[in-house]
Image (cartoon, grey):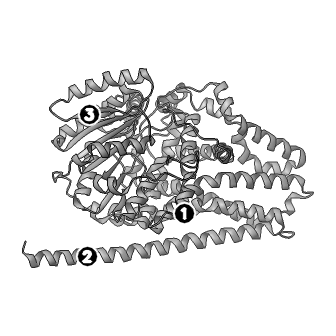
Amino acid sequence: MTAYARILSERQATVQTGRWSSEVHRRRLVFGLLVGMTGLSMTGLMVLTLSRGGYDLPDFLLTVAFMLTLPWTVVGFWNALIGLLIMRLSQDPARIVYPSAASLDDDKPVSGSTAVLMCVRNEDAHEVARKLDVLVDSLVSTGAAAKFHVYILSDSTQNENVRVEQTVFRRLQNRWWGILPVTYRRRNDNVGFKAGNIREFCSRWGRRHDYALVLDADSLMAAESVLRLVRTMDRNPRLGILQSLVVGMPTLSPFARVFQFGMRLGMRSYTLGSAWWQADCGPYWGHNALIRLEPFTEHCQLPALPGRPPLGGTILSHDQVEAALMRRAGYEVRVLPEEGGSWEENPPTLLEHLRRDLRWCHGNMQYWKLLGMPGLKAVSRLQLLLAILMYVGSPAWVAFMTIGALRAGLAEHPGQLLHADTAWMLFACIMTMVFAPKLATLADIVATPRSSRAFGGRVSLLIGAFGEIILSAILAPVIALAHTRFLLGLPFGRASAWPAQRRGTHEVSPADAAMRLWPQTVFGASMVTWLALASPAALVGFLPFLLGSVLAVPIAVVTSWTGLGKVLSTRLGLWRIPDEIAPANELESLRLPALGRAKKTLATSRAVLHSARSD
């Protein structure tokens, strides 16, 4: 290429970048206006609903609580609607939100050297090694093994875990000796938690590699997906973090089956919609993502927060902050909104889900001290604020329900507290917005026969979607009360524990469920009793929202039954995900119990269908 041609190419790239930047600014302006107008409209409708007979202090408190629950609801609604429009109107949705990644040549050799970082702390070493073995085997089969090096970064503290790790990971090293290097390192302390673990790697080995693929102990990725991330980063030197779309692995846990089915429904529309306006200021979820090591090492050192723990000291939820710092340094943070080839294990029980959720809640509350950090992009600050409001919305919802129930019980005529017509309108709007991400993706799948078959057919899909929405609505107060109880204790020094998760399928005993969920049960029973005595008519309206709290313990127990999971998977085929219908080779290699059950179900269904056609 001549000097003139090179200059002309650079000028064209600059012009294209400028045009894309202007387009992103317009998108963000439109999105902000839509969210703001919707939030104001919903607030105005709430004020109008409460204004019957005057507008007093309880009405004001109800309005404030309602407003605190709105941000995530409204943002989710518009993300979903925009995502649905992209899915229905574009044959290549990825090109709309990330044009350069959509036009990649998937046969081009990778040029960058990638470190695969598996971060573990008191995990099941055998399961970690199994997943790593599948990934390494997949990489070797592509012929790209020379560009990768696996690092197992252990922060394990329990002696038995350490002994098992040393044996199991040495065996993994020997298996791939001379083909793809595997390095095992254990720190003697847990300084900085996972972020500190990766920071130590950057200081020790980071200069040897261009990129790092960050994995959690429950992560699995296909070689094709990893190579796509690397090729994308090879192509764009200003790309700092590239997040893959992570989905749940097939499981026999009833709770996890329902949870990941709902996540699978809501994720695609929501992620496409958010990527449309976030663009180069996208999310980083801390795992199953590729990071560019040089700017990460130089610019993404986490600051120590002022004050004492639990809100001061070491930053616990590192991913969002690292994404904000990468953007501040001028590098892009993107999500590749394509399903397939990137998996994780979801919590197998309600109790494990709450344990993980409260850790995130604890970490997100530290973001209050980071909102004023100098130099952050406006979208990065907004993401930190939304991460806070995601959990602040829970005590606001609890306050809204409590004030509403007390007021209804004390009123002589509860029906005269509200304008019934606007109340029903408001309820319909909020429920639509809450479930919009799932409904949007569901609409796209139902409209596409091939996509419907991937979930077991339209009938199974619709039944599963209806059941998942009902169960998630029932569980919402259980989760909100857990957040509220934790947040009330946080200013007084109560912190969440960060132990290793129980990732394997297991059953919850009634005693364990009662020990963890008694506050939800007491709250729900108290509210039901109060309304039943003070205003039975009002109880009818509140009961759907209180039912989950009253039944929290039996729900936690029943949704952990492995036998129930087998029935749902084998006999009923409920809450199937595409990876059960047509599993990838990597999942097949793990020999997951849920896949074996799914195969039997599909074989039986096909035999019955064949017999019916013969008759």
User: Gap between marks 3 and 2, in whole Å?
Assistant: 42 Å
Q: Position of residue 478 (x, y in %)?
A: 66, 42
**Mark 2 lies on residue:** 14
580 displayed left or right of 534: left
Q: Tag 2 or tag 3, which sits nearer the N-term?
A: 2
Q: Residue drawn 60% across and 70% down?
A: 38
Of the image marks 3 and 1, the number of the one nearer the N terminus: 1
Using residue 53 as the reference point, say whether residue 272 is left or right of it.
Answer: left
Query: Residue pushed farthest front?
Result: 307
**Residue tagged 1:** 75
Please tell me which residue lies in front, 561 or 520. Answer: 520
Asked if residue 444 is positioned above or below residue 615 in the image, the reply reads: below
For badge 1, the amino acid type reads Val
Label at residue 32: none
What's the mark number on residue 183?
Answer: 3
x, y percent for residue 432:
60, 59
